[in-house]
Amino acid sequence: MAISKDLLDILVCPLCKAELEMKPDQSGLKCVQCKRVYPIREDIPVMLIDEAKVEE
Ligand SMILES: [Zn+2]
């Protein structure tokens, strides 16, 4: 079960409050502004700055 669209709509980057977009392989949520990717574990997005990795 993937993250629902409704949930995705309310989630923002905890750092810069920008929108997030699902990675194509659904392994994480990527901030459109700072490019941090927040991992998704067992269908739960981990919205912790310490857990996020910057991806270009
Ligand atoms: Zn961000």
Image (cartoon, rainbow, N blue to C red):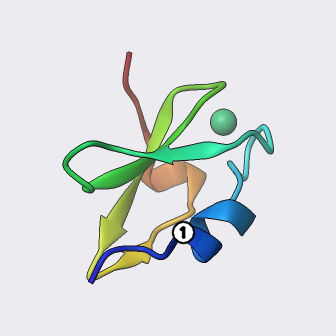
Q: x and y percent of residue 50 in the render? A: 51, 51
- State the residue at coordinates (71%, 54%): 12
User: Tag 1's secondary structure?
Assistant: helix
Q: Quadrant of residue 39?
A: bottom left
Write down the residue under mark 1: 5
Q: Is residue 36 above or below residue 44?
A: above
Instruction: Look at the image and tell me in which quarter the C terminus lies.
Output: top left
Looking at the image, residue 42 sits to the left or right of residue 34; the answer is: left
Name of the residue lying farthest toward the top: 56
Q: Residue at x 68, y 48 (%)?
A: 13
On screen, residue 1 versus residue 44, left or right, reads: left
Question: Does 52 sit above or below residue 26?
Answer: above
**Some atom of ligand 1 lies within 8 Å of the CB belonging to the residue at label 1:** no
Q: Residue at x 43, y 54 (%)?
A: 51
Pick the residue in front: 17 or 6: 6
Q: Quadrant of ligand 1?
A: top right
Which quarter of the figure is the N terminus placed in? Answer: bottom left
Residue at horizontal 42%, vertical 74%? 3
Give x and y (percent) for residue 8: 58, 64
Q: Amino acid at mark 1?
A: Lys
Q: Residue reaching furthest front?
A: 5
x, y (%) of residue 14? Answer: 72, 53
> Residue 26's spot in the image, x, y percent?
27, 56
Instruction: Please say if 50 is above or below 33.
Output: below
Tell me how many marks there are. 1
Badge 1: few (under 14), some or many (20 or more) residues near its Cα, within 10 Å?
few
Q: Nearer the viewer, residue 19 or 49?
A: 19
